Amino acid sequence: MVNYAANILNSKLLVKLFYATISLDTDWFYRRAAQVFMQGCFGFDKVRTTLQVVASRLTDKLIAICRNPARLFSAILFNNTPPAEQYNPDAYRQAIGIGVMYFLGIFSFFCLLFFLY
């Protein structure tokens, strides 16, 4: 039985050797293209990193300006820059819920008017 299986395998092997063809290794093309693509991506990454650093610095400056718009306007109008206020966590601030409550009350009033008329 083993001899019969070996003869079948040998016959198939001889057929393959007889009809052997030269095959072109085509994976070289997309591997080379992928390598060039990745080099381009690394170049774009340097540009993106530079733009991100510039945007971060600009954002930091805008945050400092927008913290107190009155100080910005006084600096523009009177050409002076008063010292920046320090954040005081103990200072009284109105709760945000009060403004939300006012908005919801006014919005409900207008909705009621809209549905009644």
Image: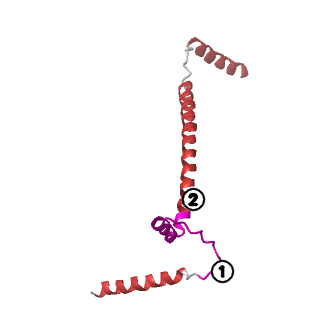
Sort mark 2 into few (<14), some (14-19) or many (20+) by Cα contacts within 10 Å. few
Quadrant of the rendering where the C terminus is positioned: bottom left
Whether 81 is among the magenta residues is: yes
Q: Which residue is found at the position 62% from the left and 80% from the top?
A: 91
Q: Nearer the viewer, residue 75 or 72?
A: 75
- Please provide the residue range marked out in magenta: 64-92
Q: Which residue is found at the position 56% from the left and 21% from the top?
A: 25
The picture quadrant where one finds residue 85 is: bottom right
Q: Which residue is found at the position 55% from the left and 13% from the top?
A: 19
Which colour scheme appears in the figure? secondary structure
> Compared with residue 61, is residue 101 higher up or lower down, i.e. above or below?
below
Residue designated by label 1: 90
Residue designated by label 2: 60
Q: CA distance from mark 2 to mark 1?
A: 25 Å
Left or right position of 114 against 96: left
Left or right position of 83 against 2: left
> Compared with residue 73, is residue 43 higher up or lower down, i.e. above or below?
above
Q: Secondary structure at mark 1?
A: loop
